[in-house]
Image (spheres, rainbow, N blue to C red):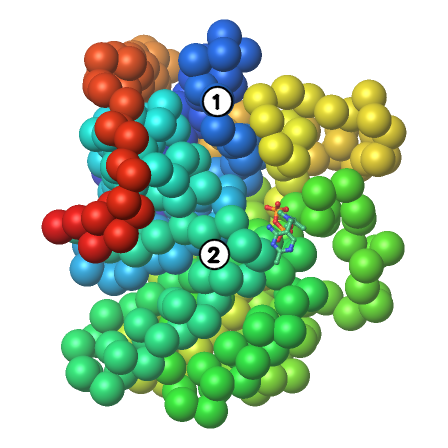
Amino acid sequence: MMKKQNLISLYKKLILIRLTEEAIALKYQEREIRCPVHLSIGQEAIAVGVCENLKKDDIVYSTHRCHAHYIAKGGDLNRMMAEIYGKVTGCAKGRGGSMHLVDLEAGFWGATPIVGNSLPVALGVAFANKLKGNKKAVAVFIGDGTAEEGVFHECLNFAVLHKLPILFVCENNLFSVYTHLKERQHTRPIYKIAEAHGMEAYQKDGNDILEVYKISSSIIDHIRKGQGPAFLEFMTYRHREHCGPFYDDQLGYRDQKEVKYWLKKDPVTNFKKYLLDHKVILETEMEKIKKEAMGKITRALDFAKKSKFPKQEKDFRKLIYAK
Ligand SMILES: Cc1ncc(C[n+]2csc(CCOP(=O)(O)OP(=O)(O)O)c2C)c(N)n1
């Protein structure tokens, strides 16, 4: 069993991400947040289990569904909330919104919403790291839909060819917007594609944080030793709609049996139960952790609300090249 302090560290991050996104969902409904939000509620264990094995100067890239990755990598919560509110104090100066989070200091080098877009950028950084011999690992998070982009195959091939220190993390939540994987792909699993490209690849339960942590720990070690890239496919499920704060099961695109199955596998509820059953933590300590997380979220919301909107800039070159 992992040490108590490590288990608690996982739980703190997990609960912070869940509560942050629930707060975002509420504020969105109050029309305080106007940019599109893609919530990771239900998928958080992957972000936490992977990032817990990364060092501060390792680098993470992400997608449109990036809040969990940003927080798990140690991104500044105040600046994330301000960005989602479109404020000038935001991590992208209020010009990017929820899908363009970035925190260079924390090693979260960015998220972009063009599906597959982060892959070649992360690959280039991994290539540079290898040439510099700096032992930094790069982890790039993608969804299952990304495996359908041509650039996915180009990047996997290049990473193997040059034995790059990069971890591909596929969060397979079975859907690309409203279309189930089985309507989009042949029956072979996604990690088998990576394996066919010649890298170590595994498929694991993405809702079991300890399983995510364990496989990530050994595979990141493998990458650091210069043994080449690796691919982890984590099976998971998003609880809410593809984009936005609500539930959209009334649309009928998801089998209700499937939804029920995955709701029972909620990573937060199950990890909480594990910690209590194994007497790692008392209910009262858990409440304290929750309160601390709520405090951070309240302060971040306050910071976002009190911040100003960016000034209108007529010359966009000034914006792009501003120091
Ligand atoms: C190149 C490109 N094509 C289409 C879209 C529209 N789009 C946004 S998210 C998305 C689904 C992506 O699915 P997946 O990669 O599985 O991630 P998930 O949303 O499930 O986390 C699509 C098709 C896009 N943003 N970029």
Q: Neighbour class for label 1 at 10 Å: few (<14), some, many (≥20)?
A: some
Residue bearing the label numbered 1: 34
List x then y, in percent, for residue 95: 34, 37
On screen, residue 79 above or below 181: above
Instruction: Tell me which amino acid carries mark 2.
Output: Phe
From the viewer's perspective, is 162 left or right of 125? Answer: right
Label 2, ligand 1: CB separation under 8 Å: no
Q: Secondary structure at mark 2?
A: strand
In the displayed structure, 233 sits above or below 296; it is below
Depth check: give the residue in front, 54 or 39: 39
State the separation of the CA atoms marked 2 and 1.
25 Å
Q: Residue at x 52, y 31 (%)?
A: 37
Give the number of the mark in front: 2 or 1.
1
Give 97 or 268, whichever is nearer the viewer: 97
- Disc 1 residue type (three-letter): Arg
Q: Which residue bears the numbered disc 2?
A: 141
State whether residue 181 appears in this view: yes
Q: Are marks 2 and 1 in contact (CB under 8 Å)?
A: no
Pick whichever of labels 2 and 1 is earlier in the sequence. Answer: 1
Quarter-of-image position of residue 224 = bottom left
Q: Name the residue located 48 percent from the left edge and 38 percent from the top edge.
A: 44
Q: Is residue 302 left or right of residue 213?
A: left
Task: Point out residue 153 in the picture as x, y percentages from the top left corner.
Answer: 60, 77
The residue drawn where x is 80% and y is 48% is 180
